[in-house]
Image (cartoon, grey):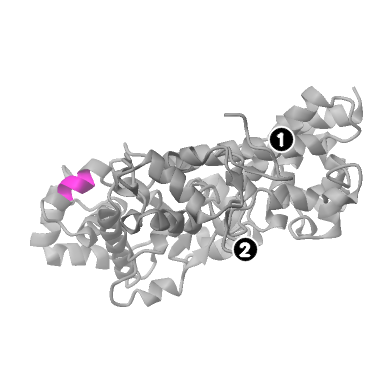
Amino acid sequence: MTEAQHLRHAILSAALETSNHGETPTTGTLYIPLSHLKALRLDASVVVGGRGVGKSFWTAALRAPELRATIGAALPELDIELFTGHSEKQDDPAYPTEDEFAQLLARGYQTLDIWKAVIHRWIAAKNQTTVPTQSWPETLEWQKNSPHESAALMRQPRSWKGLILFDALDRTSRDWQQMDEIVRGLLQAILWLKSFNGLYGKVFLREDQAERTVFNFPDASKLKASRADLNWARHDLHGLLWQRLINAPQQHGELLREQLPASLYSQRNGIYLLNDEMKRETEQQREAFAKLAGPWMGKDKRRGVPYTWSVSHLADGRGQASPRSFLAAIKEATEETCDRYPDHPQALHYESIKRGIQKASGIRVSELEEDYPWISTVMEPLCGLTLPCEFDVFETHWQTSFPNGPSSIQSHRLPAQHSEKGWQGIVEDLKRLGIMETKKDGRLDMPDLYRVGFGLGRRGGVKPQNK
């Protein structure tokens, strides 16, 4: 085999998956963008990010002692007791399920009190203090009827410091207003928790959750001031890729490390770590990707540079690209080069990188459908359109498919936020999610990341997938 063929096999042996669904990541896959350090600090009580940017990843990583020790090299303050106050897992007795939330609210319990009950149970268990835990109503009634005992529990001397994490809050309700109440109550509970020394809370929110009325309560500005956003710049994504590559197993990792000067990485406890030059947009980082993908996205420079092209075509309408999409695109591009261009001198063929974008687009659309099932319903009538185009064109297709308007669209999860505003409200929601954007001339357009996956065309753009 040629070196390029060996490199392809090495790339495919690396961990290029990020959809962990709450499972614990491995030490070799742990990469901390410099911009994410703020989000991991104890004083960052609210962390906001879109789908696939790392909310569940960091929740799982912080829960794992071995990974927390690795993170602790950059943030020693995380040498602390960790507890999960909510996550994707619906079978964890530490917090109410979606159905239990609905039942508790129907019985008149306040969301702030429900979250205090979660925290009280955590503190009681750590302090080996007995509180009623047979059911959530039992704990809530104890809180209500024994205020002195619950206050004393929180004031007990502690020989430990603790951080409680809250993630996947869209799984608490299928109704926007009810979810707003639940999240608002949680944020109030986090503010209450701040009054106790050594106890910290961290809430991971989706962007659309943070944009709603969840901060409408007294002193919410104190939490807003501690907000941190999870964003991935182009150099962060390339840094993540190389972190995965240099930790590929056995001889594959050796070959990939040989593509970098030895000064660009180091080894600690059996794990290879990138130096700062490979975590920033430097000439070294650009040259490293050029070794894999070549200098151009075609036969000459007119088509662009793979280093920038691969990320820019994965960005949403707000210019944000996710690590999940980027790694999926690289994996697909590698597999596709193996199949179609086995004798290509580089590990990645530029045409395969384009098809990697198609694959990543399909994955991104599937992820969206999990969180926002209504999106695929409203996008289906638009399949085959060529963008950009006028709003009237969209509206005509929608009115044909949904004569009773957007409010008639059913969803088993959270519905569109602004469907009561008609089709303009749907466009507003799509723009907020980065799926759609308005050009300077007023026409509507979509970034390649979503346009390709939903089957819409653009003259000269990446072709949509066959549907």
Magenta range is: 100-104
Label 1 sits on what residue type? Answer: Arg
Give the Cα distance between marks 1 and 2: 30 Å
Q: Is 275 positioned to the left or the right of 408 in the image?
A: right
Q: Is 416 positioned to the left or the right of 102 in the image?
A: right
Q: Which numbered disc, 1 or 2, marks the residue that appears first in the sequence? A: 2
- Is 306 in front, or is 99? 306
- Asked where in the image residue 284 lies, by quadrant, the reply is bottom right
| Residue ID at (41%, 53%) | 426
Q: Is residue 104 above or below residue 355?
A: below
Task: Check the picture and name the quadrant holding the C terminus.
Answer: top right
Label 2 sits on what residue type? Answer: Ser
Q: Secondary structure at mark 2?
A: helix
Tell me, yes or no, whether the highlighted magenta stretch contains residue 449. no
- Is 391 in front, or is 464? 391
Q: Whole-percent x and y of residue 207?
A: 46, 59
The dot on residue 355 is 1
Q: Secondary structure at mark 1?
A: helix
Q: Main secondary structure of the magenta part?
A: helix
The dot on residue 71 is none
Task: Check the picture and name the quadrant holding the N terminus.
Answer: top right
The dot on residue 35 is 2
| Residue ID at (33%, 48%) | 405
Q: Whole-percent x and y of residue 412?
A: 32, 39
Tell me, yes or no, whether the highlighted magenta stretch contains residue 101. yes
- Is 74 in front, or is 97? 97
Q: Dot 1: within a 10 Å radius of its alpha carbon, few (fewer than 14), some, or many (20 or more) residues? A: many
Q: Is residue 23 above or below residue 132?
A: above
Q: Whole-percent x and y of residue 373?
A: 40, 40
